[in-house]
Amino acid sequence: MKSLWTPWRMEHVAASAPRATGCLFEPPGEGSSDKAHLLLFRDRLLVVLLNRFPYANGHLLVAPRRHAGDLADLTPEENSALMAMLAFCSQTLRRRFHAEGLNIGLNLGACAGAGIPGHLHFHVVPRWPGDHNFMTVLAELRTIPQHIERSFDVLLPDFQNYRP
C-alpha cells in the first residue's frame, strides 16, 4: 500500500493554524480580483472565490458582500445579483472546464453544515463522469487534477469581463 502525504493540511485539520482575522468573504482591499486570496470577482454586491479546499478543480464560492445568514436577509437586488452570478458561474465552468454537470449548494445554519453560518454562500462544483474514483471511497481522499492557481488563471479573464 502506498501513502499519499499532505502535511500542509495538518494545521487546517487540527485547527491549529492561526485563525484568520475577518471574514473569508471580505478579502482585504477593494480590487475586483486578487490571486493571493483566490478572489475572482468582487463588486458592490457580490464576491466569487475559488474554494481553497475544493471538492473538484474550479470549485467556486459565491456570496453577497454584506453579511447575511439567511436567504430572507437578502435584499431583492442582492438576490437577483446572486442568481445572475450563479448562472454565469455555471456557464463559465461548463465552457472553461468542460464540466458535464454541476453541484450548486447552499447550507443555511451550522446544523445544516454551514461552515460560516453568519455569511451565506453558494458552492458551485463542476462535475464529470467518474471524477471521484476509488480514492474517495477507500481512502477518504479527493484527487484534484489541476493546481488551484492554474484554475484561477483559467477563470479570471471571464470574471474580469463579467457585466451584470
Image (cartoon, rainbow, N blue to C red):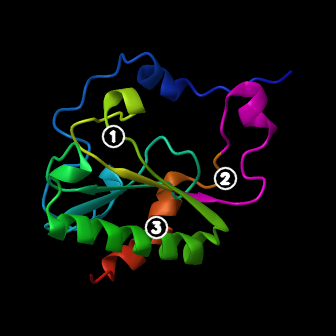
Secondary structure of the residue carrying numbered label 1: loop
Secondary structure of the residue carrying numbered label 2: loop
Residue 36 drawn above or below residue 33: above
Q: Residue at label 2?
A: 145
Residue type at mark 2: give it.
Pro
Q: Residue at label 3?
A: 153
The spot of residue 11 in percent (x, y) is 42, 21
Q: Is residue 75 left or right of residue 108?
A: left
Numbered range of the magenta stretch? 125-143
The spot of residue 128 in percent (x, y) is 70, 60
Residue 71 drawn above or below residue 117: below
- What residue is shown at x 23% (from left), y 63% (from top)? 46
Residue type at mark 3: give it.
Asp
How many neighbours does mark 2 have within 10 angstroms: few (below 14), some (14-19), or many (20 or more)? Answer: few
Q: Is residue 27 visible?
A: no
Q: Which mark is residue 108?
A: 1
